[in-house]
Every structure is written in C-alpha cells, then in structure tokens.
C-alpha cells in the first residue's frame, strides 16, 4: 500500500489484513473481567491507542511487562468506532508502523460487513472457477485458514443457476452447528476487501454426505480447513477474537 498509494486494490487488501489480524492492545491497567482501559497517546493533536501484531514488538516498545488485551483488528475497530480515537499500529518498532486516524477507524468499522442476506436459488450446473482473480482465491483461502475447527473443507466453483444467471459459489462442508453466520460474515469481509461485491460469490453450507459434493469434486477448487481439538458438535461457535471488550 505504501509503495503504490494510488492502488485501490492494495489499500483494500491492507485494511482486510488489518481486520483479520491478531493484535495486542496496550492497556493502561490490568483488565477487569471484560472491561479494559486502553493506554492512549496524543500524536499531532489526535488521540491514539497502541496495538502490536507480535509479542516481541509490544515488548520492544514497552521495555517491560505491560498489561495488554488480545483481539482482532475488526473487534478493535468496533471498540474504537465513534470514540474519536485512532490506532497507532506497531509504533516505533517496525517498518509497518502506521497511524490510522479516528476517521479511518470509523470507516473500517462500517466497511466490515455483517452477516450476508440469505437467498434461495437452484443450481443447474457447476463449472470450474476460472473467472475469479487469483487475489480473490487467495483471500478466500487465507480466511478459511483462520476458521480452523469451524468446518471440514470448502469447494469453490462457478454456478449456473436455473434462472440463467451465473455466479461463483463457495460450498462450506460440515460446518459446526451455529458457526454458519460467523463463517458467512468472515467470507463476506474477505471478499469485500478484495473489491468483490457480495453478489459475485455466494456461500452455501452442505452436510459432509451431500450428493452434490460429487459434482463439486469434479470441477471445483478444494480448500481444507485446519482442525481444532475439542470442537463440540452443538451450540454456536464464535471466535474469541471477535468478542470485543467494553470501554469504560
């Protein structure tokens, strides 16, 4: 993004990477339950909290053991939105150091989509997903790689529907009950930060023994999700990083 400031695609990919990143937020005091007090700094007249993408960078900045909270970029954006507070990412300790002003954080919180709208459609034919750019395929693979334990695998194909319309479809196989909204929202976010509209790639959820999987296997691109020990078969599964604490 820094090397190509006029490249909208690079800028979207950066914000997408920030949204999915695991960040360590510097705190002013130890957390109390789900309530936290972020440490703040004033830079160029603006208020900023400080977050780091590795423990080493946090330690390098602070110099001593300090209280911190671990949360995703999307959770942090939701926490800061509307507060008039920006984000200092990796300040003074990495080439990736950047100041994200409050108005940019407000935009990021709005840009992150919620659960997509559910639709019904009948697929008439499945075709290979040749028309999707490699950057989009890579973004889907990266986001699925972060969803370990929430599903078994996924298949990407182009779907020709009974009404004559063609769209790509990502079939998520064997999702843990209750995880479907989380997966749908995460994939919509990944696609949005690639500049792909929500209507260009549908997401569907299939059982592990669904007959249509044979067709996906003949023409589709398979993604294997990493497993996770101890995943239960019942109840909603929501990644901890997406549960933001409350400011006080």
Image (cartoon, rainbow, N blue to C red):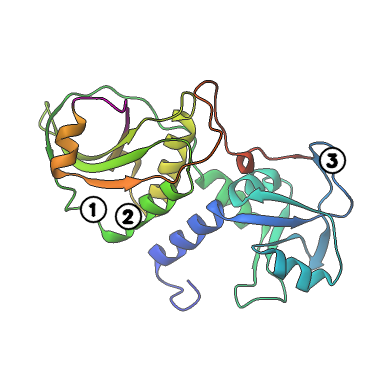
Left or right side of 90 for 146:
left
> For the residues carrying marks 2 and 3, which lies nearer the camera in this image?
2
Residue indicated by mark 1? 132
Q: CA distance from mark 3 to mark 1?
A: 44 Å
Q: Residues within 10 Å of mark 3 (few under 14, many from 20)?
A: few
> In the image, which residues are magenta?
204-211
Residue found at x 79% / y 37%: 34
Residues at circles 1 and 2 in contact by the CB criterion of under 8 Å: yes
Q: Which mark is residue 136?
A: 2
x, y percent for residue 147? 47, 43
Q: Earlier in the sequence, mark 3 or mark 1?
A: 1
Residue found at x 45% / y 36%: 183
Question: Which sits in the foreground, 82 or 21?
Answer: 21
x, y percent for residue 103? 63, 55
Residue indicated by mark 3? 248
Note whether residue 215 is visible: yes
Residue 220 in magenta?
A: no
Q: Quadrant of the C terminus?
A: top right
Q: Eyeballing the image, is 210 above or below 2?
A: above
Q: Quadrant of residue 46?
A: bottom right
Local secondary structure at mark 1:
loop
Left or right side of 7 for 146:
right
Residue found at x 47% / y 35%: 150
Q: Residues within 10 Å of mark 2 (few under 14, many from 20)?
A: some
Q: Which mark is residue 58?
A: none
Q: Eyeballing the image, is 53 above or below 105?
A: below
Question: Which sits in the foreground, 219 or 196?
Answer: 219
x, y percent for residue 64? 87, 68
> For the residues carrying marks 3 and 1, which lies nearer the camera in this image?
1
What predominant SS class does the magenta segment belong to?
loop
């Amino acid at each position: 993004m820094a090397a190509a400031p006029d490249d909208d695609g690079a800028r979207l990919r950066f914000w997408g990477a920030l949204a999915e990143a695991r960040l360590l937020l510097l705190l002013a005091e130890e957390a109390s339950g789900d309530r936290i007090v972020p440490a703040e700094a004033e830079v160029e007249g603006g208020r900023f909290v400080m977050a780091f993408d590795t423990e080493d960078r946090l330690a390098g900045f602070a110099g001593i053991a300090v209280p911190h909270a671990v949360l995703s970029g999307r959770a942090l954006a939701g926490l800061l939105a509307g507060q008039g507070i920006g984000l200092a990412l990796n300040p003074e300790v990495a080439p990736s150091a950047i100041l994200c002003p409050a108005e940019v954080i407000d935009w990021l919180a709005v840009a992150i989509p919620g659960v997509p709208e559910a639709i019904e459609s009948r697929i008439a034919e499945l075709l290979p997903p040749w028309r999707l750019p490699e950057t989009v395929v890579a973004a889907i693979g990266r986001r699925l790689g972060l969803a370990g334990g929430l599903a078994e695998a996924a298949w990407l194909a182009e779907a020709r529907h009974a009404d004559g319309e063609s769209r790509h479809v990502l079939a998520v196989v064997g999702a843990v009950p209750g995880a479907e909204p989380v997966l749908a929202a995460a994939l919509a976010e990944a696609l949005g930060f690639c500049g792909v509209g929500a209507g260009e790639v549908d997401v569907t959820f299939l059982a592990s023994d669904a007959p249509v999987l044979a067709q996906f296997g003949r023409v589709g691109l398979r993604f294997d999700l990493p497993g996770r020990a101890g995943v239960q078969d019942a109840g909603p599964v929501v990644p901890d990083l997406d549960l933001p604490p409350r400011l006080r």
